[in-house]
Image: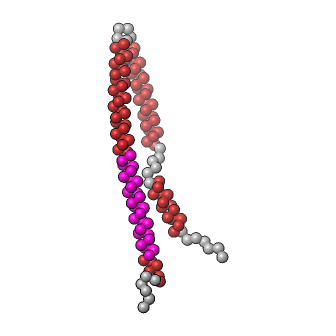
Amino acid sequence: MPDENSGLIGSVKRLASTLISIVATRLELLSNELQEERLRLAQMLLFYVCALFCFGMGVLLLTVFIVVLYWDDHRFAVLGGLCMLFFALGALMMMLWRNMARSRSKLFSASLAELSRDREQLEPRERHE
């Protein structure tokens, strides 16, 4: 009676085991990349909110300072000028944000590269005789 680990059935079992191992490894890699991306986005959001708060407070205090400085002479001109400046800066920031949102993320790039390498290794190679 032939050994079950040799021959065609054994080869198919080893191939199936190898393929399952490859798929499991790639799924773990995808999971790790998703977790890293989630943590990166959460950190970016936290930094964004903190920076936005600090810049907002700075702009508010600077505006109050400039208006108080020119209170007697040109308070309405200063308020109007600062209002226009803030609207222009806000529009610029929105355009920059939109461009950043349109750029491609590098999410799954390592997994796709590994899957491409796996596909290349599994493709039959031509034999030169």
The answer to if 32 sits in the magenta stretch is yes
Q: Return the residue found at the far top.
A: 72
Q: Nearer the viewer, residue 56 or 91?
A: 56
Q: Position of residue 68 (x, y in %)?
A: 34, 14
Query: Relative to 64, does residue 125 appear above or below in the rendering?
Result: below
Quarter of the image where one finds residue 31: bottom left
Q: Position of residue 111 (x, y in %)?
A: 45, 57
Q: Return the residue found at the far right.
A: 129
Query: Relative to 82, does residue 121 appear above or below in the rendering?
Result: below
Is residue 43 visible in the rendered image? The answer is: yes
Q: Position of residue 4 (x, y in %)?
A: 42, 84
The answer to if 100 sits in the magenta stretch is no
Q: Return the residue found at the far bottom.
A: 1
Dominant secondary structure of the residues highlighted in magenta in the image: helix
Image quarter (top left, top right, bottom left or bottom right) of the C terminus:
bottom right
Q: Position of residue 100 (x, y in %)?
A: 45, 40
Magenta part of the chain:
14-40
Query: Relative to 101, does residue 25 appear above or below in the rendering?
Result: below
Residue at figure coordinates x 47%, y 55% from the top left: 110
Residue at figure coordinates x 65%, y 73% from the top left: 128
Residue at figure coordinates x 42%, y 61% from the top left: 26
Is residue 9 visible in the rendered image? The answer is: no
Query: Relative to 126, does residue 98 appear above or below in the rendering?
Result: above
- State the count of labels: 0
Residue at figure coordinates x 34%, y 18% from the top left: 64
Its colouring scheme is secondary structure
Image quarter (top left, top right, bottom left or bottom right) of the N terminus:
bottom left
